[in-house]
Amino acid sequence: MPAPRARDAVVVAALLRRIGVDDPVALTNAAWFSARRGLTAAALTCAQRAASLPGAPRAAHRTLRQLLAGREAALLLSLPLAMHDAADTAERGPALVATAVAPEAVPLTDDEMLALGRTLLETGHLAESLGMFDAVLRHRGTDPVALFHRGVVLAKLRRYDDALSDWGAVERADPDGMLGTLSRRHAASAKQLAELFATR
Amino acid sequence: MHGPLSEIGLADVLQLLERGKRTGVLRVVGPDPTTPRTLYLQAGRIVALDPDASDAALAAALAIRALASLDPATPEDGPNAVPHDVREGLRRRLATRTLAGMLHWVRGRFDFEAHPVGDGPLSLSPDGIVFDVVDAEGRRSELAAATNDFHAIAGFAPPDIVASGPAPSLGVLDWRILDLVDGARDIASLAATLGEPAEDVADRVRALMTAAILVLQPPLAEAARLAIDAGRYDEAIALLRSRVATVPDESAAWRALGLAEVGAGRFDRAVDAWMAWRNVAPANRDEADTLIHAARTMLEALREP
């Protein structure tokens, strides 16, 4: 797969905004398109979303599996739903559809879950993103990257106390590092917001 | 029944066989004797065409279109996993396209041998193919006129425009076109890379334009010429370098690149461009040599004493 170029990322982002989040075939094909440009995180987001939609074609689940296995070159395009054989949707779906809410259902490594969580966070899928970081932290309870990003998700969900707790843990673990510094800064903002919400 | 195609064209042969409802095998050798075709006819209709519409050709075509995998380790993603109608529709298109080309053959020969032929995956009427070819030619002319003879260049619209508007309905060919669009390739080049008819690609490119996803620009040669005429040499050079990087054997682009480099005062690069031009177009060797010599003379003249 080629290295992503800035122009490609912009085009992919624009197309993704255009096609929306409700068409499993378009999302599956957007995953193919993104992966062909080396934008694996965007591809993964599309495939994840496609596979989670009702009536997703077999190609959506296949695409997600191949991406998680790092086999971008093996991705295929999906035909429109009207052209699929009846047996071509719904099969093999449930296990992978559940990926976002139950990451243990498929064999994802912690790093894959971390990457997926960040992608889901970037694309505004907060609940699914939180599930990913929770899963990583169940295995690696003090992982500063997972804690930091979970803090971001929690703050976006307005769970400021929980966010402060995660960022506090990062700061204690790595007070002089980049994540520690960012956590300190985020925590200060979160405290202000928490006070704002408490007094409104 | 046999004879040279110079005396009786394949369209006439097939129409005779259809009207006589003949069953048998028609072997056709065209201008390239290394790629003979075999047509299987049942009661005058074409039921199979080798090798262009064989199972192997169909599997390869599905793989090129990213619809099936040829990896034996994943048979569940193989050609047979593609819905029957889609698979056989593609086979029919492969056959029709091949036959459309064969109808123009005026060199080679044909040999028809009558014997029993079973059912095949196709059921094509030779008369129908002739009508399809005529229809396609008309459509091709219309689209060629609308796209600078398929030399208009497709690029993405500005991102804010791509991102706005209703969700488009994109088919497999649309995604494959979007995958190749780079702002440098023209429609003819896209079609050649995709292995699809230029009119089909032009048709979809125009639909993607209507959807505000793509924009069409004038052919690069024209855009580069306009830039050279206006003295915007660096712009012309950027266009032409992009072009030769994509289509390295396009002699006109190399020639124009040399001109643009001269305009920009970079005679050494002009020499390089014209040497490349000479390599890809040996027929223009004399003109290229003259220009190279002139550029080298200028280079020497401008060199500091």
Image (cartoon, grey):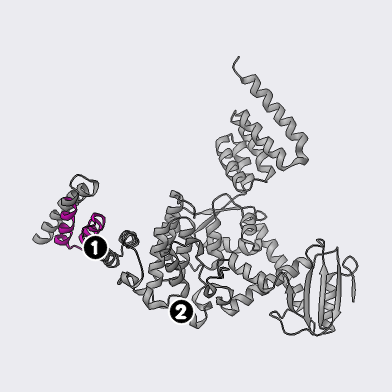
* Residue A117 visible to an observer of this rendering: yes
Q: What residue type is labelled 2?
A: Thr
Q: Compared with residue A158, is residue A174 higher up or lower down, i.e. above or below? A: above
Residue B209, percent across and down? 53, 59
Observer-nearest residue: A148 or B169? A148
Q: Main secondary structure of the magenta part?
A: helix
**Image point 66% across, 74% down: which residue?**
B55
Q: What residue type is labelled 1?
A: Leu
Observer-nearest residue: B279 or B96? B279
Residue B294, percent across and down? 70, 27
Say few, some or many: other residues with alpha carbon within 10 Å of mark 1 (under 14 / 14 to 19 / 20 or more): some
* Residue B164 visible to an observer of this rendering: no
Residue B31, percent across and down? 82, 61
Tell which residue pokes out farthest to the top in this image. B305
Q: Compared with residue A157, is residue B116 higher up or lower down, i.e. above or below? A: below
Q: Which element is circle 2 on?
A: loop
| Chain for numbered disc 2 | A
Q: Tell me which segment is drawn in magenta.
A: A142-171
- Foreground mark, 2 or 1? 1
| Side of B163 relative to B209 (left or right) | left
The residues tagged by marks 2 and 1 sit, at their Cα atoms, a distance apart of: 34 Å
**Image point 50% across, 70% down: which residue?**
A78
Tell which residue pokes out farthest to the left in this image. A199
Say few, some or many: other residues with alpha carbon within 10 Å of mark 2 (under 14 / 14 to 19 / 20 or more): some
Who comes first in sequence, dot 2 or dot 1?
2
Q: Mark 1 points at which residue?
A: A137
| Side of A190 relative to B2 (left or right) | left
Q: Mark 2 points at which residue?
A: A89
Which quadrant is the C terminus of chain A positioned in?
Answer: bottom left
